[in-house]
Image (cartoon, rainbow, N blue to C red):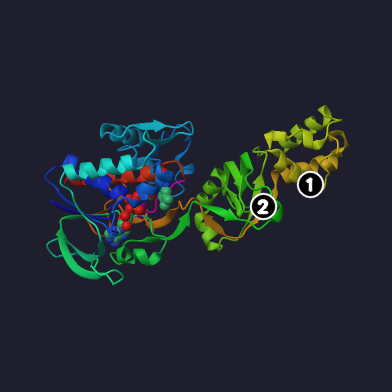
């Protein structure tokens, strides 16, 4: 059985190694268009590679996988985060789980994962071809696949253009693991085989907000903010970091993921509401502020920070409410309390663009899960062709969940294919 894997990234290698473990007789070739394999794994997690997550904090998969939750839930029955943890440890990569539930190699070095994959690939005789871009897949009458490949060759002379050699390879099965592509054109060759494409747009980015006053708070972290896009269901909660260009931090990244398509449709211009209190019930917050005012009549507003809000941010909220920070709590009155509560809970901004988060992003969109059998990840339009990893319309928030998608989907395809 000859299997062609298109893409030498996380999912491609994980598939190939597992398929060989389950079915040593399979002949597997990985085609990678770049001159190096596993380049995203290398830079992932700031070079440490956040391999997976303990999922201990996950109450509902829909908060983790804004796209693909249903499919992931099903596929986790075959290979979940605990299986991934065991797999890496069994293959010599010791892992550690941080307090925030993110799992990293104990070495704190993504190189451990790469060395593991490369040594396994070598051990199993998996063929790895770099500088080989697959441009087309065709199916012959005898049901074999033909991969059209452009092989790039660098010439000896510095600065001279590289040459391209065109090749064809015949395969019994093909696994597409080409990763995310924020460009629709990058998916057309798969659309032409009948697959439905969910328009790709970026996910996991930070918000650009033009506000001089906000910029002065640069570096301030609000530990528990609720951010939302008015008149939509998009809302998230967590730490928020004020940056020199706008807002970042887990709450913002999560919101960018939930609202990835909505924000793309609106050219990254949108109103944004920030609730700095972290409490969504207005009566509760009003009561809390009223109690502070009654119990601290003679104290200045600046001396007591509700909800542990950093002092610079608290003073900013007070000033935004048209109240002097040296005013006493007892002088606030009903109107003053209402203004503070309003600015604390409904602080309004305008998103005017996006920026990359440590160059980390994933693609929202790709091969629609409607185009695959969700138990096996086999194409509904092209039997014998499978998909794994970020090429599928499955993406997650940060925390190791995107690699978990790669491990889970790749394992499921390996298991399915080797049972043929
Ligand atoms: C900077 C950064 C940091 C990240 N950190 C984390 C993290 O710590 N934890 C986490 O869970 N996720 C992280 N992610 C997301 C994670 O890297 C991806 O979700 C994951 O790599 C997807 O795996 P994949 O195999 O599907 O795709 P990729 O790893 O992108 O691999 C796809 C491969 O296919 C090749 N390819 C594409 N088209 C062709 C073609 N036509 N022919 C041949 N080869 C082709 C590409 O060159 C690439 O090597 C990070 C992403 C970025 C950008």
Measuring 37% from the left and 67% from the top, which residue is drawn there? 185
Label of residue 215 in the image: 2
Q: Estimate the x, y position of residue 88 in percent, counting from the top left.
A: 30, 35
In the image, 297: left or right of 269?
A: right
What is the secondary structure assignment of the residue under circle 1? helix
Q: CA distance from mark 2 to mark 1?
A: 15 Å
When the figure is inspected, residue 189 is found, relative to residue 179, above or below; the finding is below
- Magenta stretch encompasses residue 390: yes
Mark 2 or 1, closer to the camera: 2
Answer yes or no: is residue 8 visible.
Answer: yes
Around disc 1, counting alpha carbons within 10 Å, would you say few (fewer than 14), some (14 to 19), or many (20 or more)? some
| Pointer 2 or 1: first along the chain | 2
Q: Estimate the x, y position of residue 384 in percent, counting from the top left.
A: 21, 55
Q: Estimate the x, y position of residue 266 in percent, counting from the top left.
A: 56, 62
Q: Are marks 2 and 1 in contact (CB under 8 Å)?
A: no
Measuring 79% from the left and 45% from the top, which residue is drawn there? 339
Identify the residue position indicated by label 1 in the image.
Answer: 319
When the figure is inspected, residue 382 is found, relative to residue 64, above or below; the finding is below
Q: Which residues are magenta?
A: 389-397
What is the secondary structure assignment of the residue under circle 2? helix
């Amino acid at each position: 059985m000859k299997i062609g894997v298109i893409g030498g990234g996380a999912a491609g290698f994980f598939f190939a190694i597992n398929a060989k473990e389950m079915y040593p007789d399979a002949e597997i070739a990985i085609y990678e268009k770049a001159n190096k394999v596993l380049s995203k794994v290398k830079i992932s997690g700031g070079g440490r590679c956040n391999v997976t997550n303990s999922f201990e904090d996950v109450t509902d998969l829909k908060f983790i996988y804004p796209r693909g939750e249903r499919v992931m839930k099903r596929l986790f029955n075959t290979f979940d985060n605990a299986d991934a943890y065991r797999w890496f440890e069994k293959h010599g990569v010791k892992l550690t789980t941080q307090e925030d539930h993110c799992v990293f190699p104990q070495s704190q070095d993504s190189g451990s994962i790469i060395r593991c994959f490369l040594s396994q690939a070598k051990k199993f005789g998996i063929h790895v071809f770099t500088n080989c871009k697959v441009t087309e897949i065709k199916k012959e009458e005898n049901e074999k696949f033909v991969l059209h490949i452009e092989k790039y060759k660098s010439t000896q002379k510095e600065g001279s253009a590289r040459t391209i050699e065109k090749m064809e390879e015949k395969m019994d099965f093909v696994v597409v693991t080409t990763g995310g592509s924020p460009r629709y054109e990058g998916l057309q060759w798969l659309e032409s085989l009948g697959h439905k494409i969910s328009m790709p747009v970026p996910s996991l980015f930070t918000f650009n907000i033009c506000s001089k006053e906000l910029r002065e708070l640069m570096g301030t972290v609000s530990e528990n903010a609720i951010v939302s896009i008015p008149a939509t269901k998009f809302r998230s909660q967590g730490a928020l970091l004020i940056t020199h260009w706008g807002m970042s931090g887990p709450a913002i990244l999560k919101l960018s993921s939930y609202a990835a398509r909505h924000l793309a449709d609106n050219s990254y211009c949108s109103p944004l509401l920030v609730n700095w209190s972290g409490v969504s019930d207005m009566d509760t917050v009003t009561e809390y502020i009223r109690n502070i005012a009654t119990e601290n009549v003679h104290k200045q507003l600046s001396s007591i920070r509700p909800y542990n809000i950093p002092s610079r941010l608290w003073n900013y909220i007070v000033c935004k409410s048209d109240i002097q920070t040296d005013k006493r709590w007892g002088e606030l009155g009903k109107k003053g309390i209402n203004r503070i509560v309003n600015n604390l809970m409904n602080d309004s901004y305008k998103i005017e663009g996006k920026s990359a988060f440590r160059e980390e992003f994933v693609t929202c969109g790709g091969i629609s899960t409607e185009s695959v059998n969700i138990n096996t990840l086999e194409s509904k339009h092209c039997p014998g062709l499978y998909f794994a990893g970020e090429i599928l319309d499955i993406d997650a928030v940060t925390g190791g969940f995107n690699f978990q998608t790669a491990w889970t989907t790749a394992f499921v395809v390996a298991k399915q294919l080797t049972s043929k």
